[in-house]
Image: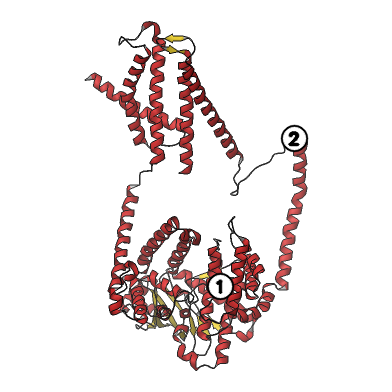
Amino acid sequence: MVASILISISAVVSAVLVGFVARRILGTAVGWPRSIVVGLVVFFVGVPSTAWTLRQTGLDSAGAVPPDDLWLWIGVTVLSLAWVFALGVAALVASEAIFPTRPLPNPIDLVRAALRQRKRTRRYIDILAIASRHGVGWLFHGGRARVEEQLSTSEERANAIVATINDAGVSFVKLGQVLSTRRDLVPEPYLSALASLQTNATTLPWQTVRAVIEGDLDVPLDQVFAEVDPVPLAAASVAQVHRARLLDGTDVVVKVQRPAARAQVEADADIILRLAHRAEARTRVGRDLRIESVARGFTTTLLEELDYRIEARNTQMIGATLDRIDRADPLRRRAVTAPAIFPAASHQRVLTMGLVDGTALSDSADRLSRMDAAARDRLAEVLMSTVIEQILVYGVFHADLHPGNVLLREDGTLGMIDFGAVGVIERSRRQHLTALLLAALSENDVAAVDALLLIVEAPADLDLEAFRHDVGVVLTTEHLRSDAHASIFTRMVDVIRQHRLALPGELASAFRSFATLEGCLRVIVDDFDMAGRALALMPTLLRRTLSLSRMATDVQANAVIGMARLEQIPRRLDALLTGAEKGSIGITLRGEDGRDLRGLLDRATAEIASTLVSIAAVVLAVVLIVSGGGPVLGGSITLFAVLGAGVGLFGFLGLLRIVRRTFARKD
């Protein structure tokens, strides 16, 4: 009984000791469960293995310890156990290399992950059920039977897809809105059907809307509004809009978020991000398009649009740019407007704005057809010049300017609405973007490529000549095409992505705004020549961007910075000369992230030296054991054999440490 207890205690101590020593020797963390298992194996294998070694060397032929060779017996025993331990560590390294240890997950995280997985699964099932109900399950599983029987025409299929998107919820309606502006990708009649998503989403009952308003503002409805029309003015993907009147008699519209919008967007965003992550990890196209980053930007924008306090600030910024444009060109005063915001009647899920009377461009075909050609042309030119000036001069612009977000007002002017997504470009980037636009509009492919390389992050293996050729082809063909579905800006982005150039997010928004602006202009005038009209507009915008007062201010700012740097030169020069005189001048190497590389070089040098020493020890051990020379210490053991076994053990453990650290760096 006592012997069994002692053996058990020794086994446990051996297991823990092996795991601890293995971690210290390998220099990196290994899993404790497998360390304990290896320790137990070493304990139970070590004793018979040592006994076998002693018998083979003649030190235990009679089953007893030879008194004359006691120290040799102890040394061989320790050396044999050490080699068993080393082989166990080797097995530990191999198991870690094949199946790396993963940290045990937090139980709370496991529960949360299970709940998210359950929510995602239910959402997948919901989407498939909606698609099947509307007869477009073939989008997911490829079946065509019901399509051929019930959806025989393109118009029927387009309407079925739109009905599916409407029922699928906020995120998919938003995706449909984006696709409705891609005339270069989506053919008719799908384009017209998707355009209905801008305003014609499913409406909510008034009692639900009233509960959201009162819950968000935390006051009864009649303490803020004199009246609210229970019939919605419009229903969109995230919210619906009601006409109302404030207590002071001001006519307004109230944008009310759908109660389930946030939960649904968060669930869809999780699905979209996971799919994008898999696509980027497993496909070349996903990596080239950096699709995970694109999806993250898309979902982030969706979530931000759910906070109407952000939209209120965005609306006020756009209004400020329009006021500046009106002051710079009085002839365009109030030609394009943004609604006023009423903060006292607005919060996170409720946004109260001034009433912008009119209909969306996507629903204004009849009104536009009754206007004369000159009035429509003037309207399109005003919209174009306003948006381009917002982007290039002021750097704040509507990032979702589809035809549903531009209203044709009763007086013939235009009103912008829905500022959940607003792009902001800093001044230095705007200058590069202006140069690019000038080069593109004048069909200068060399200058366009130079301007693009100032904007984008070019990979080291970029084929500059092929890139210039592709840009030139786009500029040449788009200047000559009369096809109303063409978009020079969309094709430029395609070329950038084909050559794996990383376009910053805010500039991608600007390119998208140029493309959607082109779509809005062609709703007003079918054959509107945006490239030609924008080129004629550029000199005026350049004068506003490069005004004398701004250039003078820039010169002053640069002069002040230059003077500050000049004042530091004598002090730095004195420190340099003093260091040279004392012989203490040094060079500091830093990486791209600013870290000091001296420590890295020291570690690399130490690892190289350790590797060479370990290899030399293994080679020396083989030579000593194979030669078999030296005096006989006892039994059949020679001095060279003992030295070889000891030196080999040292080299073997050193090589294991290097292998394990290499795998740890890869992980």
- Location of the C terminus (image quadrant): top left
Instruction: Say left or right for 532 vs 31.
Output: right
**Residue at the image point whose x is 52% and y is 85% from the top:** 526
Name the disc covering residue 583, or none. Answer: 2
**Residue at the image point whose x is 53% and y is 64% from the top:** 497
- Residue 64 vs 17, above or below: the answer is above
Report x, y in % for residue 658.
49, 34
Front-lying residue, 313 or 136 = 136
- Amino acid tagged 2: Gly
Q: Total of numbered circles in the picture?
A: 2
> Would you say residue 334 is visible in this rendering?
no
**Residue at the image point whose x is 74% and y is 50% from the top:** 568
Q: Quadrant of residue 635?
A: top left
- Residue 491 vs 660, above or below: the answer is below
Q: Neighbour class for label 2 at 10 Å: few (<14), some, many (≥20)? A: few
- Residue 60 vs 25, above or below: the answer is above
Instruction: Say left or right for 323 vs 257.
Output: right
Q: Quadrant of residue 40?
A: top left
Q: Which residue is mark 1?
A: 489
Q: Mark 2: which secondary structure? A: loop
> Residue reaching furthest front?
627
